[in-house]
Image (cartoon, rainbow, N blue to C red):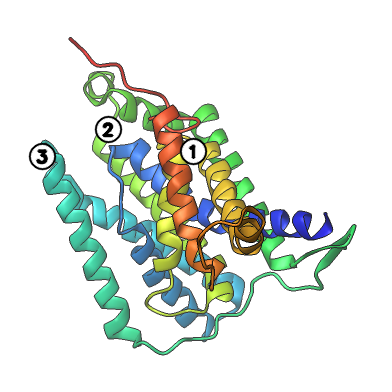
Amino acid sequence: MTNFAQQVVSGVMAGSLYALLALAFVLVYRASGVINFSQGEMAMVTTYLAWVASQHMPYALAIVVMLAGSFVLGCLVFRVVISRFEGRSELQTFVAVIMLFLIFDSIGLALFGPDPREFKEPFRGHPLHVAGITIPIHDLYILASALVIVVGLYVLFQRTRLGLALRATATDRVAAELMGVPTQRMLTVGWGLAGAAGGMAGVLIAPVVTLTPGLMSAVLVAAVCALIIGGLESPGGAIIGGVLVGVIQNLVSTYLSGIVDFLHLPLEVTDANAYRDIATALVLLVVLLIRPAGLFGRSAVAKV
């Protein structure tokens, strides 16, 4: 039982990594209805910015520089690229996002090369030991950071004039413009906030998986699954979806071989980790069959 609890806790901590990137997806989708598949590569570029800045200034200041750069990058991506595709087909916007993915991926490789870089952990300390369960202090702070971002987003969207303008823009852009809301500015801010959230995700993920141009590739798929499972517009759903994906992956990699042997299934499991993504995809399919909008999403009502 202790081993099971350890795997669940470790899964929650790993899932919080996915949740951080999923939160950036939620911000972009709520602002403009676009799933920004280049979000991970944007985060990779700004994580390198934090790494370069940390070589010349205190770590905390480097993080501030990274957050500012991430915000500006998100704003520029919207104003220079995405805004040009407003009113066009979803396919054209999708292609533009994929091109951005390739551009940022190439920029990371061209500027910094394929060699891994050491990125120190922002949070250090001895791991916690609770009832036989070990919790690395860095993982605990990742989960805490995700929760803080969710609470911050709730306060922003529900308690501030800026949040009200952002929600109005996302709900009905024409009505918001008639009420005097500068919708283009709000969309730009939404993409900037998403860039900052993604950059923070990259900084927290880099010490765990090492800093390379492929930093976010493994996390991206899991984050998108977490996003869809939780609901495209739900920050809380992104957290729960990320945690669910992390726990499922950990349990599959730990117990799949034993389950196959117990049930005498005609399957040879040489590497249970290879089945982690398969299990995640199956859960995603089940959720979509039962709740097409995700666990905490809202189904759209077709207008006749």
Q: Amino acid at mark 1?
A: Gly
Q: What residue lies at 43% left-to-right and 73% top-to-bottom? A: 215
Asked which secondary structure carries label 2, the reply is loop
Give the camera-side residue of 270 and 98: 270
Asked which secondary structure carries label 3, the reply is loop
- The numbered dot on residue 182 is 2
Badge 3, how many Cα within 10 Å: few under 14, some, many 20+? Answer: few
Q: Amino acid at mark 3?
A: Ser
| Image location (x, y in percent) of residue 29 | 34, 40
Residue 24 seen in the current view: no
**Which one is earlier in the sequence, the residue at label 2 or at label 1?**
2
Q: Amino acid at mark 2?
A: Pro
Give the camera-side residue of 210 and 48: 210
| Image location (x, y in percent) of residue 245 | 54, 50
**Which one is earlier in the sequence, the residue at label 3 or at label 2?**
3
Left or right of residue 169, residue 294 in this image: right
| Image location (x, y in percent) of residue 288 | 40, 34
From the image, state whether disc 3 or disc 1 is nearer to you. 1
Left or right of residue 30, residue 272 in this image: right
